[in-house]
Amino acid sequence: MLRIGIDVGGTHTDAVLLDGDEVVASTKSLTSSDVSSGILDALEAILAHDRGIDQKVEAVMLGTTQFTNAVIERRELAEVAAIRIGLPSGRGIPPKTGWPEDISRCLGGNVYMLQGGYLYDGWPLAELNEREVGTVIDDLKAKKVEAVAISAAFSPMNPEPERLLAERVRAALPGVRITESHSIGRLGILERENAAMLNASLLGFADRVVDSFVKAIRQRGLRCRFFISQNDGTLMDADFARRFPALTFASGPTNSLRGACRLTGLNDAIVVDIGGTTSDFGVLQDGFPRESNIVIDVGGVRTNFRMPDILSIGLGGGSHVARDGSAVGPRSVGHELVSKGLVFGGETLTATDIVVAAGHAEIGDPKKAQSLDPDVVKAATREISRMLDAGVEKMKPSSDPLPVVLVGGGAVLVTEQLQAASSMLLPEHSGVANAIGAAIAQIGGEAERMISYDKTPRQDAIRQMTEEAARVALTAGAEAASIRVADVEETSISYMPGNAVRLRVKVVGDIAGRFCDSASLRAE
Amino acid sequence: MKLTVDALPDLSSGAVFLATGGGGDPYVAYLATQKVLAEHGPAELIAVEDLDDDAFVAAVGGVGAPTVSLELLPSIDDPGIALEAFERHVGRKLDAVVSFEIGGGNSLIPLIAAAGRGIPVVDGDGMGRALPEAQMMTYPIAGIPSTPAVALDYAGNTATFSTDSTATYERHIRNLAQAMGGMITTVEHPMSGKQLKSSIVPGTISFSIEIGRILRECRGNAHRILAPLREAFAGSLYGELCHIFTGKVADYSSAIVGGFDIGQAVIESFEGSGPKLTIDVKNEFLLARIGDQVLASVPDLITVLDYETSTPINAERLRYGQRVSVVGVGCPDYYRSARALEVVAPRCFGFDCDFAPLEKLTEYHQSI
């Protein structure tokens, strides 16, 4: 089965053509500012050798860090009006409390708190106040707000207040983009509200990015199915990605970890993905990314997505290097490395220039790095190793030595054995591990239902829902033997009789030999 | 001692460790305390010895099901309003406040109440951990009446209590908490400085900051944090720290029943084979057992740590698939007295077993 994996990073766009497990072709090119021409170039590079091959490709899987990068770098973020329905609870703790100043500013100052929402037992916390709602809507109109995030107390148990307000806002402001918090998160109103705000802030950008993905793939003439990978390593279709761009957060690291596992055959290792701007440290356990247990910051904002446990530091091929070599990163020239780096004739001293000057790599025009002071090169090289060593040390699951797998375009930065590693691997195609990871992304299947545990005992209910979720995954093309439970989520609905819960089970599995066209990836 | 905003992160994470799963996620309380201290300046923390014998003190904190406060957010003015309502009710101003439990959010609520009013917080609490019910506090165990007391809900509604029996007070307040949205702020156990000196578990706020510092500085794999933690507990009024079990959460279920979070967590080895550890939850982790064999029991502390980072995890944040280490700590001696065990032993929670001191159960604990 032929499939294409593409990884659109901040600096590079990589692509691989896989035939089963075998890498048939791979390429690495620069991410273009319009994204789609970069993808087209990459497709051209991996498919050009055989024109007839286009029709045999069964699927294109695309992973992207565009949305994570947008949050981390505070760009492409639209202003979002945050409306929380929950007063009189939470006075003095409005939406965005605890956010870093800079990203809070990006999303603007339109924050509203309204009376309403429900208590745990289904009793109204307060009635939605018509006059308050009217005032907020008038204000949204006056400010020509384009994106809105709505949260309400206990909305995972009862989403009605969020839905109601969303309808009112939509009616008053046609074309407004809205994320309702219950659609993107679980219990924990602050984290859910944060996730909804980040998501709403990215909706406009998501349309542009997904449009350029679709444009590139269609322009190439590929008519196969097309997916985008999400943070848990499963796939979503393009329309879903337009509505929930925040679900791609951390899909980059997930893909690189899965790609590293496939490339090395190692199931337990530390994987360091060095890109143009950051180095991401992750841990492979039994062939899957180690998941983070704790509440996760995305660009300094607390969320409750399930994500791989990643330590990200500001060190990449494009990282700025201090003139005396004492500091590296976190600022980076990113995809402008090829115009701004010294070896490319630019003016900025970058980590790549240091590696070239030290004679460890031939990139650009090495002569342009020759004039660098050897002491500066030495100091910067030492600093780069120190940063990487500290990262590996922090992520190691125990004091036992573990192999370190280097992936990503910036792997050239590693010029000496790291003290914290038992061995170091730089597998073939490691530069495109992300794209390989995207190509082997998994199929997820979900089932969700309100269940009374008095009628169906809990264990039976979980078994039934797991079977149902597995059926969804099977229909969507998962291989039966590989299906495993990824998540069981129960929200007890205390106000319903009979010990009622909303039970959600998610399973994941590897892609079987062939896709079934009829399948939907998600069952409601 | 001045307690500044800088001490809050360590205090909150240390308090989650001592909370044994309960006490509520301190994050929101942390945000609120941060705001209040930024506005009013640092809170004053005093040692109980420095309190006048005739000072007028009361305990303040949140009562209810911790899961509720994930959604029904507290308000930053709630503790202050509750304090004022209490003072109006008893007709006397408070000289200091004290925590009921050094657990999660309840370690911070007294700071919010006190900072706004410029009165000190006494270093210590009434449990040395978190426990679900009022009669389990050292204050009533020492014979201090729970009432007069005042409760405040999210909407500013108040209720007052007057009863001789702490068990009755607990029953009333629990039922009221259920009707008031599942989480309320109470001011209770009014007492003199002298009474507090004879009943407090002293120094637990500073100790919590110390535990928080260790968790921050030694952040990383749970096995590696055991040694520094063991050392800190060895020099404290707590007993020994023991590793009980390491594995992944194979199942966790909980529901809000009768005003509590009631649940059960099952933890299995990373390989999925061998015996499974069950932890019974009533707001707090109360009993850790493999089948019928108890590995740790209330009032000893049972704490669940994130295996990779050693971050302590509240019961309401437990999730399927999490990799965790379970540790136990011997409770302060006070709680092992016959008088205290009458109200906090496993049978008081409906478990069919007696309290077994943690350090006598080491043969059943999983080796590291």
Image (tube, coloured by chain):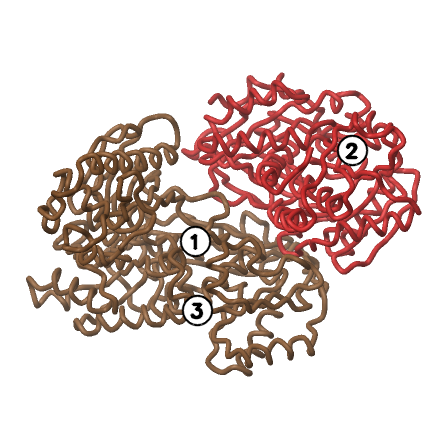
Q: Is mark 1 on a helix, strand or loop?
A: loop
| The disc label shown at residue A299, or none | 1
Question: Who's the residue at 58% across and 69% down the image?
Answer: A162
What chain is the brown one? A
Comparing labels 2 and 3, the label whose residue is closer to the camera: 3
What chain is the red one? B
Q: What element carries label 3?
A: loop
Q: What element carries label 2?
A: loop
Question: Who's the residue at 12% across and 54% down the image?
Answer: A24
Tell me the chain of label 1: A
Nearer to me, A238 or B144: B144
In the image: residue A98, left or right of residue B185: left
| The disc label shown at residue A78, or none | 3
Q: In this picture, is A319 found above or below A42? A: above
Are the residues under marks 2 and 3 on the same chain? no
In the image: residue A72, left or right of residue B147: left
* Amino acid type shown at disc 2: Met
Are the residues under marks 1 and 3 on the same chain? yes
